[in-house]
Every structure is written in structure tokens, then in C-alpha cells.
Amino acid sequence: MANPPRSRKRVQAIQRAPDGSAFEKCDCCCDLVPIALIDMHDCRTGKDVKRFKGIFGKPNVNKQSFCDQPRSAFKFFMERFKETYKTGTVIDIDEKGFETWKNISKEERQPYIIEAEKVNSAYNKALIQEVNDMFEVDDEADSSKVGKFEQVTPILRFTLF
């Protein structure tokens, strides 16, 4: 008379993170929550958070184009060199362009230097104009109507040296 086989209960192990902390599944939102933080868990926070997208739905960011940014004389030289020298790989073109730039005289570099100075001065003027057009805003307004009736004063103006 042997004992009948016992039916074994299957026990699910608690899920653990790589650092050994245990997690438990929330009954309401079905998210895994650390056991140490289960008493602070709020199921509504993740679903009710809405991001303010602004007036038009997308942030209004003025991106500068690549041509407006300051560039060196070497960059202008390489742009022209790549137009004239089209045989070979990109690496070969860069190497030969660099060797050519090192070997040309200062008089031959002068047109590229002048062009770079024009672009850089235009860029600096645009930056100074942008700084001068900014207005100083008081961040300590007491109500929504305060800023509507006050005069806004401009920030100090900067000039080129």
C-alpha cells in the first residue's frame, strides 16, 4: 500500500529586477511596480498626463539653415574643389583637397578668406540683431492681467567691436 501521489501546487516566483528588487503586478493598470513602492503607486498618473503642445500643436522653433552658419575659408575651398574634382572616393577627394589647400599660397587663399569673412560678419550681425530684439520679461507676475498693462523694456543693446 503505497501512498498516492500528491498533487503539487505550482507557485509563481516573484519577478525580480537584475539588482534583486522584486516587482508586483498592479491589479488596476496591469503595470509592474516595485514592491517597495507599491504603496505610493497611483494608476492614474501615467494615463492622465498630457503634454502642452502650444497654440498650434507643434513647438514653433526657428531653425537656422546651414548656409547662415559661420564657415571657414577651407570649407569654401573644399566646396569648390569637390565640384571640380569628381574622380575617386570621398576620402580621396578630401585628402587631395587638404594637400592642395596646404600647398597653395596666401594670395590664392585670399578669395576664400574674403568670402568666409562676409558670411561670418553677416552671421554675427544677425546674432546681435536677435539679442537686441529680445525683450526683458518680468517672471514674477502676480496675475494673468499684470503683463498685459505694463510696458516692456528692451535689454541692453550690443555692438560689434
Image (cartoon, rainbow, N blue to C red):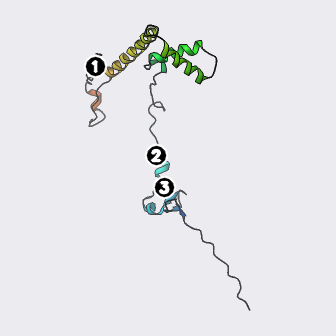
In front here: 157 or 154? 157
Element under disc 1: loop
Q: Earlier in the sequence, mark 2 or mark 3?
A: 3
Is there a contact, CB below 8 Å, between mark 3 and mark 1? no
Q: Which residue has dot 3 on it?
A: 43
Q: Residue at x 64, y 17 (%)?
A: 87
Mark 2: amino acid: Val
Which residue is at the far right? Answer: 1
Mark 3: amino acid: Cys
Which image quarter is the N terminus in? bottom right
Element under disc 3: loop
Picture quarter containing residue 40? bottom left
Labelled disc at residue 49: 2
Cα distance, mark 3 to mark 1? 52 Å
Element under disc 2: loop
Cα distance, mark 2 to mark 3? 11 Å
Mark 2 surroundings: few (<14), some (14-19) or many (≥20) residues within 10 A: few
Which residue is at the far bottom? Answer: 1
56 relative position to 131: left or right = right
Mark 3 surroundings: few (<14), some (14-19) or many (≥20) residues within 10 A: some
Is there a contact, CB below 8 Å, between mark 2 and mark 3? no
Q: Is residue 47 visible?
A: yes
Q: Tell me where residue 106 appears, x and y as whole percent.
A: 43, 10
In the depicted structure, whether residue 2 falls above or below residue 42 = below
Q: Is residue 76 visible?
A: no
Q: Residue at x 46, y 35 (%)?
A: 53
Cα distance, mark 2 to mark 1? 42 Å
Q: Which residue has dot 1 on it?
A: 158
